[in-house]
C-alpha cells in the first residue's frame, strides 16, 4: 500500500524532517501519509515521485515494476548502467538454471 511504500522509501533515503522540508509540509503530515490517515495532493505526489526517483504509479501501486532514473547521465554512463543491468540479469538467469 501507499503508506508502507512511502515509509520504506523514506527510511532508506532520508528522515521524516528532511522529507517534510523538501515537500513543504510538516513531519506530522508525512507521518499521516505513511499511516494512510491522509492522502497526498497531486502536487505532493508529484514531489514524492521526484524526491525518490520513482513514478507516481509506482507509489500508488499501479505499476509494480521498479524503474531506474537515469536522467542527468551522459550517453556513456547510460551505456555502462545498461551493461551492468544486462550482466546482472544474465547472472540471475544462469543461477536459476
Image: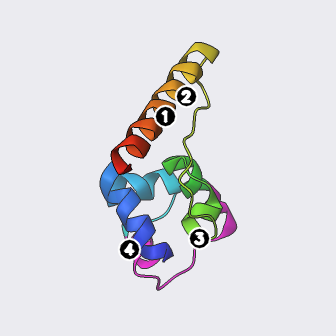
Which image quadrant is residue 26 in?
A: bottom left
Q: Earlier in the sequence, mark 2 or mark 3?
A: 3
Mark whose residue sits in front, 1 or 3? 1
Local SS, label 3: helix
Judging by the rendered image, the residue that carries numbered circle 2 is: 82
Cα–Cα span, label 4 and label 2: 36 Å
Q: What residue did someone put label 4 on? A: 31
Vertical relation: 64 (above or below) 70: below
Query: Observer-nearest residue: 9 or 24?
Result: 9
Query: How busy is the neighbourhood of tag 3: few (under 14 within 10 Å), some, or many (20 plus)?
Result: some
The residue that appears at 48% across and 34% down in the rendered structure is 85
Magenta segment's dominant SS is helix
Residue 8 percent location from the top left of the image: 36, 63
- Find numbered disc 2 in the image and state the secondary structure of the residue it sits on: helix
Residue corresponding to mark 3: 60
Residue at x 56% of width, y 64% of height: 64
Distance CA(mark 3)–CA(mark 4): 17 Å
Query: Which region of the structure is painted magenta?
Result: 28-46
Q: Foreground mark, 4 or 2?
A: 2
**Name of the residue lying farthest toward the bottom:** 37
Give the residue at mark 1: 85
Whether tag 2 and tag 3 are in contact, CB under 8 A, the answer is no
Mark sitting earlier along the chain (3/4): 4
Observer-side mark, 2 or 3, equals 2
Q: Are marks 1 and 3 in contact (CB under 8 Å)?
A: no
Q: Earlier in the sequence, mark 1 or mark 4?
A: 4
> Where residue 77 appears, x then y in whole percent?
54, 18
- Residue 18 in the image: above or below residue 44: above
- Based on the picture, tell me whether residue 40 belongs to the magenta stretch: yes
Amino acid at each position: 500500500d501507499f503508506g508502507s511504500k512511502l515509509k520504506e522509501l523514506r527510511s532508506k533515503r532520508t528522515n521524516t524532517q528532511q522529507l517534510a522540508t523538501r515537500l513543504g509540509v510538516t513531519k506530522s503530515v508525512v507521518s499521516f501519509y505513511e499511516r494512510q490517515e491522509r492522502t497526498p495532493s497531486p502536487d505532493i505526489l508529484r514531489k514524492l515521485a521526484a524526491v525518490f526517483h520513482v513514478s507516481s504509479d509506482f507509489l500508488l501501486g499501479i505499476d509494480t515494476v521498479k524503474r531506474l532514473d537515469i536522467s542527468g547521465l551522459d550517453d556513456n554512463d547510460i551505456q555502462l548502467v545498461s551493461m551492468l543491468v544486462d550482466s546482472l540479469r544474465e547472472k540471475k538467469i544462469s543461477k536459476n538454471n
